[in-house]
Image (cartoon, helix red, strand yellow):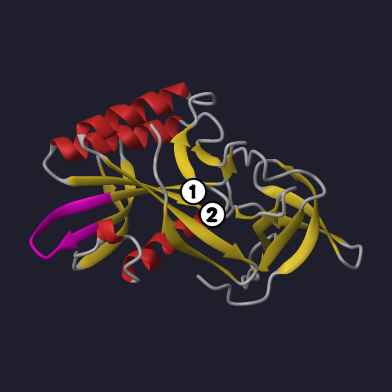
Amino acid sequence: MEFETSLLVGTLLQRYKRFLADVRLADGSVITAHTPNTGSMLGCAEPGSRVWLRAVDNPQRKYPHAWELVENAAGVLIGINTGVVNHLVREAISGGVIRELQGYATLRQEVRYGSENSRIDLLLEGNGRPPCYVEIKNVTAVDAAGTAFFPDAVSARGSKHLRELIQVVAQGRRAVLCFCVQRADARAVRPADEIDPRYGQTLREAVAAGVEALAYRATVTPHGVVLDTALPIRL
């Protein structure tokens, strides 16, 4: 995924009210940008961090810039926009990068399913194969050992999605959980039991029930974000 226009560089002053961030630009001016990330952004929202913003071509938006990238203290670029992960995974499927999800004729997005009124991120169908339900999670946090972890805050919604995927498998269809790691320094992915033990337990139950867990890492630059490397998952 390439950014359509050059990103605006600035310094993060603060993230607040969950979806807002104040950023100081090179000319000294301060703007408020939309933060497209519902998590805690653990390790990704430190004041003083270098950040990249994307101009949004929508005159009706109150905040005309969206926060896309942050550089942490170690100089690692991290993609914080959870809204792009479906696009990243679609690109990786069409480009043959995610080998586990090849061989389907059609791909639909945000399809309603399940007993808990969920929407699946991607639904792959066709070519005589059982439907494949793909739930995608954006991962931005990495521990001191270089292992990415999810979630970065308690996520009742994440556990709900796992329960839905377990039901999909019980109905004879295919269910896949795909962790999309938007940083290049991660060497593996694990559940964050120290933050949300229920999610970790539910993830292990889901895998035991037949839900497939995948993880792919992205190369992140100010020009774009591309999923390109499979990672092991440590349960």
Give me the residue at 66% from left, 67% from top: 54
Q: Point out the tag, 1 or 2, that comes first from the N-terminus.
A: 1
Q: Left of 49 or right of it: where is 87? A: left
Please rate how many residues cluster around mark 1, counting C-alpha atoms within 10 Å: few if below 14, some from 14 to 19, many from 20.
many
Task: Answer whether residue 126 is magenta in the image.
Answer: yes
What residue is shown at x 26% (from left), y 64% (from top)?
107
Query: 230 or 160: nearer the eye?
Result: 230
**Marks 1 and 2, how far apart in space?**
7 Å
Residue that carries the numbered disc 1 in the rendered image: 138
The answer, for residue 56, to whether it is visible in the render is yes
- Amino acid found under the numbered disc labelled 2: Gln
Q: Quadrant of residue 200?
A: top left
Q: Which residues are magenta?
A: 124-133
Label 2 Cα neighbours within 10 Å, binned few <14 / some 14-19 / many ≥20: many
Give the overall secondary structure of the magenta segment: strand
Q: Relative to 229, does residue 196 appear above or below in the rendering?
A: above
In x, y percent, where is residue 214? 35, 47
The residue that label 2 is drawn on is: 182
Q: Position of residue 180 (x, y in %)?
A: 45, 51
Q: Residue at x 90, y 68 (%)?
A: 27
Q: Secondary structure at mark 2?
A: loop
Q: Are marks 1 and 2 in contact (CB under 8 Å)?
A: yes
What amino acid is found at the position of numbered circle 1 in the picture?
Asn
Query: x and y percent of residue 18 in the render?
Result: 65, 42
The circle drawn on residue 27 is none
Q: As rendered, which of 25 and 200 lies closer to the eye? A: 200
Image position, residue 131 (x, y; %): 17, 53
